[in-house]
Image (spheres, rainbow, N blue to C red):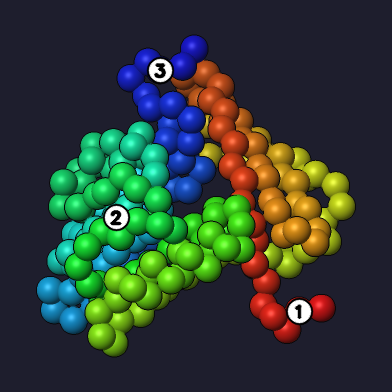
Amino acid sequence: MTDPASPPGMARIYDLLYPAGAKVDAITAFLAALCPPGGRVLEFGVGTGRVAVPLAARGVRVHGIDVDPDMLAVLKGRPGGDAVETVVGDFTADVVGGRFDVVVLAVNTLFAVPTQEGQVAALARAAEQLADGGRVVLEHFDPSVLYRQQNPTVSMRPLSGSAVAYYTTSAHFPTQGVSASFAVHDEHGVHTAAESGRYVWPRSWT
């Protein structure tokens, strides 16, 4: 049975699928080093604050935009979450206001945009909101694992505690589309969610 106090969909299981840890420490240290004292960072697809909250704890002024209010509610419920300024919106079209030393799209956020036009628009919105000398930082997986995939793949991995995640992933060449469904089993029951998007590869690939 689902915990009635838990948010629905991806917001319910995101922190299980992408736990914080040493990798987040490295990411936040890298981003903080790009900022001058009192610098400002804008995270597109800020989600549950996995990166934004510990980055704010390093003394960086962090803003985030996300289309999912349930994810932002999880962020605000984290210790230190109130230090992150958030906006509900579409980062391919909306702007937060002001200029930022860094605009970051972490954890495959650019790939979550389902069209090439939307991805280009997201990068244009990022450029519009950069301060002079600012940087856009992208984190994403190596898409060669999906390149020319013919059949769906199914995998399973243990999560924290007794939780287990099951994944089904399908990739579509040459449209570069990718879809994934998740089922997480933990002490509260089974929780499901789905994602779709478009992966990007370097121009030099053939």
Which quarter of the picture shows residue 142?
bottom right
Q: Which residue is mark 3?
A: 3
Q: Residue at x 34, y 37 (%)?
A: 69
117 vs 197, nearest the viewer = 117
Q: Is residue 175 left or right of residue 185?
A: right
Specify whether residue 149 is in view: yes
Residue at the far top in the pictured view: 1
Residue nearest the observer in this picture, 190 or 177: 177
Residue of label 1 = 205
- Give the CA distance from mark 3 to mark 1: 46 Å
Mark pair 2, 3: CA separation: 27 Å
In this view, the mark in front (2 or 3): 2
- Upstream in sequence: badge 3 or badge 1: 3
Residue 68 in the image, given as x and y percentages of width and height: 39, 40
Residue at disc 2, secondary structure: strand
Element at badge 1? loop
Give whichever of discs 1 and 2 has the lower sequence position: 2
The residue to which callout 2 is attached is: 64
- In the displayed structure image, the side of residue 62 where residue 71 appears, left or right: right
| Residue type, label 1 | Trp
Q: Residue at x 72, y 59 (%)?
A: 176
Q: Nearer the viewer, residue 133 or 84?
A: 133
Q: Position of residue 10 (x, y in %)?
A: 48, 36
The label nearer to you, 3 versus 1, is 1
